[in-house]
Every structure is written in structure tokens, then in C-alpha cells.
Image: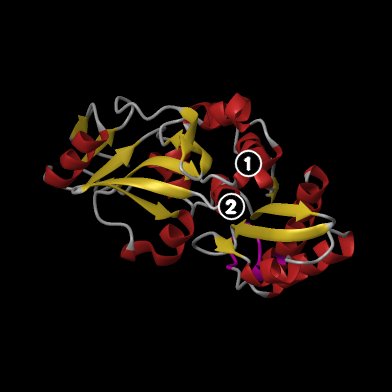
């Protein structure tokens, strides 16, 4: 049971980081609060409430490389599903992942930044952002910096420092040439994923120019299926090709087993989810 002594309400990301680093005891950032009770330690002394830091937005920005998507970390999951800025085949996986996440009550409280950070839970948005080459903007003690989402999951402590706060998720320019899709299976529709998968394809002249496949629920962090991606590039977008891509994704993983599913079941389902996501992405492309 949580026994908190203080709740702080900073007005900026800089103040939030300063509060967490300078306050005595053990603290935690709280956004939507949907995982604080199930994951929060009884030794927590205080929370830093992020609702007043002004990070609730979805916008398209012009960059030197083209148009990029920026999503504030405090944006509610429910807002992704109805945002006109996400109404494109390229960003469809984000919408589908948002629609599949928990109950409507959870979606109305949970935030994008929290879902990206708590990928070990396992959460639904990370695979969708990974296949679109997303990065995160971290506010640290020495200012903001951008880190690729793949590095954030693969290299953990090398890129994430104590007190760092996710303030924005960025999908880079060039994503428009892709079409994407998201697939998920769980014990029930509202349960966390046994396996979730997102795929993105760029197809030109009947050939797959670029393919991306990412899985979650397999292990402690989301997984990019590089073997499947390498195989798919240069192939025709056919169902046989997608089944083989799914098989390669399945063969490359070392799943965990737990009370939701065995490791062997997760491995088999990973291949099915990958093939389905690839097929649906190709249909949109």
C-alpha cells in the first residue's frame, strides 16, 4: 500500500525534473496515474504530478527534412484515436494501438508518455512508434535532448538518466511514404497484450522498398524484428512473403513465459501477429 508524504505540482518540465532530483526520499513522476498503484513501491515518499506542465498536444511541424509529427507526453491515449493529425495510412498503427488499449476509462486517463515509458508492462503504443522510426525528447537536468525510441529500449541506462522526463514523442519526416497496421492478442480484449505487433511498409512498383516490424509482450522491452525486415525488403507484397516474414520474426525471438502465456505460445503467436500486420499494412499501401 502506498504511503505518500507529499504531492508536488510543478508548472514546467524543467521544474518537474528539478523537483524529482532535489527532493529528499524516493519519488516518481505521475501522469495519468493508471499504473502507479499496481507498480508503485510501498517505499515511495512523494509523487511529482505532471498535469500542469503543458504537454498535452498533437501537431504537425515543418522541419528541414519535411513534415514531422509531435505528440506531447501528457496527451491522453483516447485523443490519439480521434486526432485529425493522425488520419493517414502511415499513422494508422498508432490509432489502432490506441483503440486497443484497455477500457475507455483507462484510455481517458492514461497518457502517451506513460505508455511509452512503461513498455515492460507491456504497453501497446511502443511497437507502433518503433516501426515509424520515432524518437523521444527527454528533459534532463542539463536541458532537453532527443533519443531514438529503439535506443531507449535497447540501451536503457546508457541513454536514460535519473530524473529524465519524457516530454514529447516525435515521428520523423518521411513517414508519409509508409502504411502501417497494429495487431494484438490477449486473454481478453481489455487485458494487457500477450503479444502485440506493428508493421509498416513502403511499397513502390509492386516491390517492398522498406519494411519494419516491432513486437511487444515478448520480453522485458519491445523488440524490433530485424531478420524479418531484411527478408521483406525487395520482395513482392504477397501473402506467402508475409507468412515467411512472420516465421522469421517468430524464429528470432526468445519469449518469456508467465501466468498469461507460455514462451512457446508467445513465439507462435508472434509470427501470426507479424504476418497479419504486414498484410494489412500492404493493403493500405
Residue 231 horizontal side relative to residue 191, left or right? right
Of all residues shown, which one is farthest toward the front?
64
- Marks 1 and 2 in Cβ contact (< 8 Å): yes
Main secondary-structure element of the magenta-colored stretch: loop
Residue drawn at the location 60% of the way across and 53% of the way down: 131
Q: How many marks?
A: 2
Image spot of residue 105 (x, y percent): 55, 27
In the picture, the disc for residue 97 is 1
Q: Residues within 10 Å of mark 2 (few under 14, many from 20)?
A: many
- Residue 29 falls inside the magenta stretch: no
Image quadrant holding the N terminus, namely top left
| Label 1 residue SS | helix
Image spot of residue 10 (x, y percent): 22, 29
Work out whether 199 lies above or below 112. Answer: below
Image spot of residue 130 (x, y percent): 55, 53
The answer to whether residue 83 of the structure is visible from this angle is no
Q: Which residue is mark 2?
A: 127
Q: Magenta stretch?
A: 256-265
Work out whether 214 lies above or below 106. Answer: below
Residue 111 horizontal side relative to residue 156, left or right? right
Residue drawn at the location 23% of the way across and 26% of the way down: 11
Q: Nearer the viewer, residue 280 or 41?
A: 280
Q: Residues within 10 Å of mark 1 (few under 14, many from 20)?
A: many
Amino acid at each position: 500500500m502506498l504511503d505518500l508524504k507529499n504531492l508536488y505540482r510543478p508548472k514546467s518540465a524543467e521544474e518537474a525534473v528539478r523537483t524529482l532530483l532535489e527532493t529528499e526520499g524516493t519519488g516518481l513522476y505521475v501522469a495519468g496515474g493508471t499504473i502507479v498503484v499496481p507498480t508503485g513501491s510501498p517505499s515511495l515518499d512523494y509523487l511529482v504530478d505532471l498535469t500542469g506542465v503543458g504537454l498535452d498536444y498533437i501537431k504537425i511541424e515543418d522541419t528541414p527534412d519535411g513534415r514531422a509529427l509531435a505528440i506531447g507526453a501528457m496527451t491522453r491515449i483516447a485523443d490519439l484515436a480521434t486526432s485529425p493529425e493522425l488520419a493517414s495510412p502511415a499513422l494508422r498503427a498508432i490509432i489502432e494501438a490506441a483503440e486497443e488499449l484497455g477500457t475507455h476509462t483507462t484510455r481517458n486517463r492514461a497518457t502517451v508518455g506513460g505508455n511509452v515509458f512503461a513498455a515492460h508492462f507491456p504497453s501497446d503504443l511502443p511497437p507502433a512508434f518503433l516501426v515509424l522510426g520515432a524518437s523521444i525528447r527527454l528533459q534532463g537536468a542539463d536541458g532537453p535532448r532527443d533519443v531514438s525510441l529503439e535506443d531507449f529500449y535497447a540501451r536503457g541506462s546508457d541513454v536514460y538518466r535519473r530524473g529524465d522526463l519524457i516530454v514529447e514523442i516525435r515521428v520523423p519526416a518521411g513517414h508519409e511514404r509508409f502504411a502501417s497496421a497494429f495487431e494484438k492478442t490477449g486473454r481478453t480484449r481489455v487485458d494487457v497484450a500477450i503479444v502485440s505487433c506493428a508493421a509498416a511498409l513502403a511499397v513502390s512498383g509492386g516491390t517492398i522498398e522498406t519494411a519494419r516490424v516491432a513486437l511487444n509482450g515478448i520480453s522485458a522491452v519491445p523488440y524490433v524484428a530485424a531478420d524479418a525486415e531484411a527478408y521483406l525488403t525487395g520482395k513482392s507484397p504477397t501473402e506467402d512473403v508475409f507468412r515467411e516474414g512472420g516465421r522469421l520474426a517468430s524464429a528470432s525471438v526468445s519469449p518469456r513465459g508467465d501466468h498469461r502465456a507460455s514462451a512457446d505460445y508467445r513465439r507462435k503467436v508472434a509470427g501470426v501477429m507479424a504476418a497479419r500486420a504486414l498484410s494489412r499494412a500492404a493493403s493500405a499501401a
